[in-house]
Image (cartoon, grey):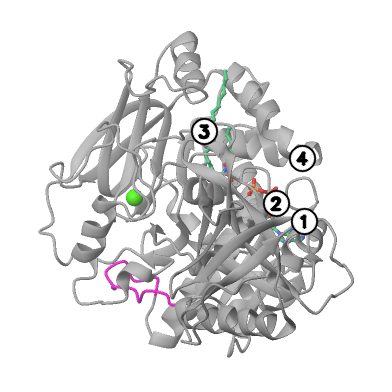
């Protein structure tokens, strides 16, 4: 075999190699690995080009990793390169990623060793943001209860191939992951990963934000304090019922795609909304803070957890049939309408220019701002606070979403043009309407039809929202005693907020002459108040401020 050219520059190597029975000219430059098929007359045929930043690993011999690891007899002259391969399927906003694999055969063992060495050097040099050590939390009860299997069969082999060492914690109770991040020594970890749905993601989010504020000596309860941005990245392996945060950031909910994004060190900053009740932090949200329909669906679905992900469809139908609307006062602080609008028909993707500008406005002096994975959007220090707008009435649904909140059920999401990291949220107000109108609104979430183009729906891009009950129906001051002072989460071992808030709801329902709030579904008299759904958790308060 003819050796075309060989260069020992640490970032360059070129030689003739074989893939199966075909001869190729392979070249490693600093940034790319290319291989071009050659015909019998040494003319170029097609070229495959893989950025070094997307090479997952290099192994001696002919190796296979998924579905099972296997090594064919090592002939001393072979090596296998694994890389990100974009599949043609996926959603319009994100493609499925698969593990590409090419087995090369060299003319000599010496050359094989050179390829191995150079590829590994190139990987180290050109992938500085890759994680080396990860702390992984698996919720064994999320979604279809497949978290453990998904991690061990699809994700762990990829991490191993990429040289990532992981410490795995299979959770035994709700809030364990959050508490671990808040309290344990995390030295040496480059990131935290959850295997589960939006609920376990939320635990990691609360852990990471809480820990960062603790270390900075800041009180998250003070709504006027500018919180510290978080350096620890969060990775999500989707294995839940909705997987909204994963779907809205990656474009698909696929464990292998997410594992590959984590391995190559991809990151996406996210807006985080803080929810306060009076002067107390209740929770953070990245997806939905929703009252009315989405609150009722969540409350109802908690009683049918045994149904798995189907519980939302069943509860959605039940709540729709109960035909409820609620009185309230919504106040919002509009965002700058010249920068973007929820109806401008744009789609936010990684590298979005609106978000880059938003990050610059929010963190003007932070050079690392654009690489943050989760960042609490700070005070409106660089904006002059505008005028609050007030809307009073009866509403079917009041939803605030910081991102599109797209998910497999609604591929474009609650607000298709919302931005992931622009420091704003979209407030969707669905006023009381006839049942068919509301059904049309809901149905449009499942198609590409504009759900805002309805006479009883308004959408505003906002920086902050307050919700209160109409005069004379305000939330009981006594409830302040029930305040959750721990990021909205209750005692150890119990489900966060959900269990506590159910009690709260029942008590409140009784105060208002109802035996059981949830029984409102089948009672003739509808309840006067709904509950807030905050990224899939029920909030223990009705009157809240979101920022
Ligand atoms: N070992 C555990 N036992 C009970 N609950 C747990 C455990 N680990 C985590 N949790 C809690 O389970 C809840 C749901 O978890 P998760 O989000 O993973 O699944 P899901 O509800 O099916 O998915 P989604 O949130 O996407 O609808 C979260 O609130 C989380 O705090
Ligand atoms: C006639 C057809 C009607 C079909 C209606 C479909 C409407 C789908 C809209 C989907 C919106 C998802 C919003 C995401 C919320 C998540 O932060 C949260 C946590 O996972 N999920 C839920 O609360 C789970 C709540 C799920 C509500 C359906
Ligand atoms: Ca946003």
Secondary structure at badge 3 equals: loop
Q: Earlier in the sequence, mark 2 or mark 1?
A: 1
Q: Are marks 2 and 1 in contact (CB under 8 Å)?
A: yes
Quarter the N terminus occupies: bottom right
Q: Where is mark 3, residue-wise?
A: 411
Looking at the image, can residue 486 be seen? no
Secondary structure at badge 1 equals: helix
Give the residue at x 57% y 55%.
38
In the rendered view, tell whether residue 392 sits above or below residue 179.
Answer: above
In the rendered view, tell whether residue 509 sits above or below residue 74.
Answer: above
168 left or right of 32 in image: right
- Residue lying at the far front of the rendered structure: 41
**Is the CB atom of the residue marked by disc 2 within 8 angstroms of ligand 1's nearest atom?**
yes
Q: Where is mark 4, residue-wise?
A: 308
Secondary structure at badge 4 equals: helix
Give the residue at x 48% y 86%.
10
**Is the CB atom of the residue marked by disc 3 within 8 angstroms of ligand 2's nearest atom?**
no
Residue 339, percent from left and from top? 17, 46
Residue 449, percent from left and from top? 41, 19
Residue 123, percent from left and from top? 54, 78
Front label number (1 vs 4): 1
Q: Quadrant of residue 356?
A: bottom left
Q: How busy is the neighbourhood of tag 4: few (under 14 within 10 Å), some, or many (20 plus)?
A: some
Quarter the C terminus occupies: bottom left
Looking at the image, can residue 11 be seen? yes
Q: In 3D space, how far apart are the residues under numbered discs 4 and 2 (Cα atoms)?
A: 12 Å
Q: Where is mark 2, residue-wise?
A: 239
Q: Quadrant of residue 207?
A: bottom right
369 left or right of 46 in image: left
């Amino acid at each position: 075999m003819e050796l075309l050219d060989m260069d020992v520059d640490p970032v360059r190597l070129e030689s003739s190699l074989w893939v199966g029975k075909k001869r190729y000219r392979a070249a490693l430059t600093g940034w790319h690995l290319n291989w071009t098929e050659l015909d019998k007359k040494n003319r170029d045929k097609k070229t495959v080009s893989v950025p070094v930043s997307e090479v997952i690993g290099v192994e001696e011999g002919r190796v296979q990793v998924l579905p099972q690891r296997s090594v064919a007899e090592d002939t001393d002259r072979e090596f296998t390169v694994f890389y990100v391969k974009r599949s043609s399927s996926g959603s319009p906003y994100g493609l499925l990623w698969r593990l590409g694999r090419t087995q090369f055969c060299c003319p000599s063992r010496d050359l094989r060793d050179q390829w191995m060495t150079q590829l590994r050097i190139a990987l180290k040099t050109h992938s500085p943001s890759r994680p080396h050590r990860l702390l992984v939390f698996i919720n064994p009860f999320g979604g279809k209860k497949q978290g453990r299997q998904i991690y061990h069969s699809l994700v762990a082999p990829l991490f191993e191939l990429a040289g990532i060492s992981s410490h795995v914690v299979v959770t035994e109770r709700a809030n364990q992951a959050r508490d671990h991040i808040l309290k344990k020594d995390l030295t040496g970890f480059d990131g935290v990963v959850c295997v589960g749905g939006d609920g376990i993601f939320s635990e990691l989010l609360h852990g990471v934000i809480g820990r960062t504020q603790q270390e900075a000596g800041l009180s998250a309860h003070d709504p006027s304090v500018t919180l510290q941005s978080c350096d620890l990245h969060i990775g999500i392996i989707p294995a839940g019922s909705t997987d909204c945060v994963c779907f809205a950031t990656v474009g698909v909910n696929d464990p292998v795609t997410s594992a590959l994004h984590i391995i190559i060190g991809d990151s996406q900053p996210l807006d985080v909304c803080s929810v306060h009740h009076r002067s107390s932090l209740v929770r953070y949200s990245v997806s939905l803070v929703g009252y009315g329909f989405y609150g009722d669906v969540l409350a109802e679905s908690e009683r049918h957890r045994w149904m798995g992900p189907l519980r939302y469809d069943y509860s959605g139908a039940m709540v729709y049939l109960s035909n409820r609307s609620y009185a309230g006062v919504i106040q919002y602080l509009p965002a700058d309408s010249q920068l973007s609008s929820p109806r401008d028909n744009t789609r936010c993707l990684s590298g979005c220019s609106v978000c880059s500008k938003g990050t610059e406005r929010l963190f003007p002096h932070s050079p690392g701002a654009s690489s943050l994975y989760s960042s609490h959007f700070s005070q409106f220090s660089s904006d002059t606070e505008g005028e609050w707008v007030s809307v009073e009435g009866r509403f079917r649904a009041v939803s605030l979403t910081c991102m599109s909140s797209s998910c497999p059920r609604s591929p474009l999401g609650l607000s298709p043009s919302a931005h992931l990291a622009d420091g704003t949220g979209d407030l969707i107000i669905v006023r009381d309407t006839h049942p068919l109108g509301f059904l049309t609104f809901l149905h449009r979430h499942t198609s590409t039809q504009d759900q805002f183009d309805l006479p009883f729906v308004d959408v505003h891009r906002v920086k902050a929202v307050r919700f209160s009950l109409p005069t004379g129906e305000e939330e009981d001051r006594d409830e302040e005693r029930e305040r959750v002072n721990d990021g909205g989460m209750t005692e150890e071992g119990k489900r966060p907020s959900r269990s506590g808030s159910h009690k709260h709801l029942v008590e409140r329902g009784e105060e208002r002459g109802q035996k059981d709030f949830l029984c409102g579904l089948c009672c003739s008299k509808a309840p006067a108040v709904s509950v807030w759904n905050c990224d899939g958790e029920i909030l223990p308060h009705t009157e809240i401020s979101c920022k």
